[in-house]
Image (tube, coloured by chain):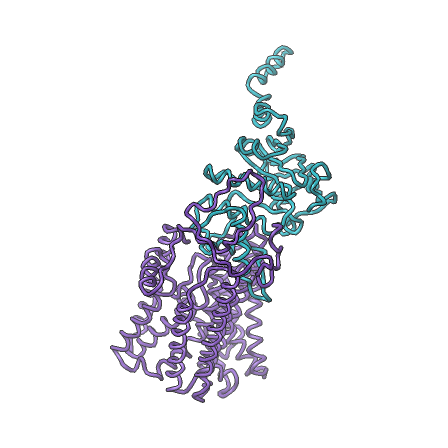
Amino acid sequence: MTDQPPGGGSGGVDPERPLDVPEPPVTPGGPEQPEPSGSVVPPSAAVSQVDPRLVMRQQGFGGYLSEFKRRVRGGELGSLPVIFGLIVIWIVFWSLNDRFLSAQNLSNLSVQIASTGLISVGIVFVLLLGEIDLSIGSVSGLAAALLAVLNINHGWGDLASIFAAMGVGLGIGLIQGFFFAKVGVPAFVVTLAGLIGWLGLQLYVLGDQGTINLRYGGTIHKLTSYYFDQVIVGYVIAAVLVGLYAVSRYLEYRRRRDAGLAVVPVQDLALRTGLLAVIAFVVAYVLNQWKGTPLALLIFLGFVIVGDIVLRRTRYGRQIYAVGGGIEAARRAGVNVSFIRISVFMICSMMAALGGVFAASRIVSAGQSTGSGDVLTNAIAAAVIGGTSLFGGRGSTYSALLGMLVIGSISSGMDLQSVNSSVKLMITGAVLLAAVVLDSVSRRSQKASGRA
Amino acid sequence: MADTADSSGTPVLALSGVSKRFGAVQALSEVDLDVRAGEVVALVGDNGAGKSTLIKVIAGVGPPDSGTLTWEGRPVAVAKPHDAQALGIATVYQDLALCENLDVVANLFLGRELMRGIALDEVGMEKQATELLTTLSVKIPSVRIPVASLSGGQRQTVAISRSLLGDPKVVLLDEPTAALGVEQTAQVLDLIERLRDRGLGVIVISHNLDDVFAVADRIAVLRLGRNNGVFDRRTVSREDLLAAITGAIDNVVTRRQARKSGEDRGDQS
């Protein structure tokens, strides 16, 4: 393209183009091209012309309502069902036992979900490729065992042990990713072998000790037991988060407007920022009613946010979505599919290892049962419940947070009711099935309305 | 680009003696093809003649078993799609060209995203995408909707527009008009002529001889994986071209004659 800056158009503003040119209305049918073939049409000033066929949202509240109806019909529910479900779950458990919404219980809940939530952030990356990793439970257990053995038996430092455990996670991801991407074994089989094999290694590492207790008050223990008890900390963090969100959205708005592109109304930005601010400050307030802002929650949130930025704002993340949406198209566009696959499995296993570290920190020990049981299913279920598709190409790390809140709330609520664990398992299974059904159905209606 | 815009000069891209085998099938044997700057070469042939295989060889998707590729006079190896892109070869495939879950902008820039630091330059990409599509008179509802919601014809125009973003010197089009309506076919043909006028070499695969005669300068025929003649569009007749494509010289009548002459020599077949 001779009239485009090739490649690196920094700032995206063409100096030869007058800015802020009011766009002439485009008539239906658009400007036809009557010129003899071969002539080059000069770029018109109408940069952000809008096709009349495109359904635009009307202004005002009615606009939001009709947009909402259209989305529900088209299966573009996003995170609405899970937020709605979460509210229902909270109301139900609160009506059964008003301690459910107490500051203490909510604070505990926020720490409880961190371990499996971190694993779930990793599995989101794999699910985006349309693949699955069944080994995450075993990898988290192995990482916890290694952490304990290195820290207690071999006297490694706390941080060194944590990083070593995460490094082993990276290595495991490299091995599994290699067999999947280079050898061509289905990920399901590779990670099923990993599920068994890494559990075996976990038992081997623990030896005949069975369970190794960690040090109380050490850095590892503090990961899930430290609270910022100064009231101000929670509010400052909330303010910073809201501020960063508002500034980044506003800068994006300004750049789009300056480039002559379609922009969302400013009221929209204000509404979203206000909503985020209310949520952030309510959370900070509730947490301050108990012990303060938990470190574990901040770390979990940090990984969720960073993961989302990586996925949506970087070239690497874009390539992950591309591989998940059409592997052949991605390969032909020059995406290194093997690299993407291997690196995603490395991220997933590393997050599983970090989740294992948090699990060990929470119970201040690592044993043969760490990482077993419902860790694997809960992590995958959380991602799917939160809205990440099992079919690849759709989802975000926020689904790990939302899904973990749902699963954690059900679990915590039933614990308060002293429900038998048999019932808990059945209900969690039903919730997972409901989420997958929702995923499949919404995918079908998205196909019908052309938004796969 | 201007220095190579002489259509009688050295070919931008030349293939010689390219062979490719899939198991028991010799898909290509000793195929030659060249394209100069500012020239449209149509690649025609019956089903299974090896057209798509040849395109894949050039695009680096399926490297040849033997034969050489020459780029602007020097031999090059194209083992990966990235090699072809780096040289300046852009390919538009018949199918599987777009990621349905990504929006139009993301698809246009897939593999060559604009960056601001380490972040994607979404504004810059959207601006360029809109300008490009406007320049090419490509009509889609919005550049921010997923490709899944576009019609087949709209997807094809997006796929072709996509190939132009990398500032290529040679564009390969695999059946660009196969899925298009009448008006969109005309748009694509206009687009191909615009590429030629910009000094690009264009290789078009097509089954539609009307399209071929409308835009091609030269017409290369493949038959059963071999070269079966290169024709000048201005001098070749439709009948001769069809004969070369279908191998009509090798038809029932000629085979019968050959058999008869064989019988005359007492050779029972």
Residue A315 horizontal side relative to residue A65, left or right: right
In this rendering, the count of numbered labels is: 0
Residue, x 56% and y 16% (percent of image)?
Answer: B253
Pick whichever, B112 or A152, lies toward us: B112
Residue visible at 38% across and 76% down?
A: A279
Q: Taking B211 as reference, is A117 above or below it?
A: below
**Which colour is chain B painted?**
cyan
Measured as percent of width and height from the top left, residue A68 is found at 33, 61
Rendering coords of residue B256 (x, y %) = 57, 15
Vertical comparison of A151 with B186: above or below: below
The quadrant where residue A181 appears:
bottom right
Q: Position of residue B94 (x, y in %)?
A: 52, 42
Residue B66 showing in the rendered view: no
Residue B261 can be seen, yes or no: yes
Q: Is residue A131 above or below residue A426?
A: above
Q: Residue furthest top?
A: B264
**Which residue is the extreme one toward the left?**
A95
The front one of A118 and A164 is A118
Q: Give the quarter of the figure containing the C terminus of chain B.
A: top right
Q: Residue at x 55, y 74 (%)?
A: A165
Q: Colour of chain A?
A: purple
- On the image, the x and y values in percent for residue B43 come to 60, 35
- Looking at the image, residue B202 sits to the left or right of residue A33; the answer is right
Q: Does residue B85 lie above or below A78 as drawn?
A: above
Q: Nearer the viewer, residue B157 or A52?
A: A52
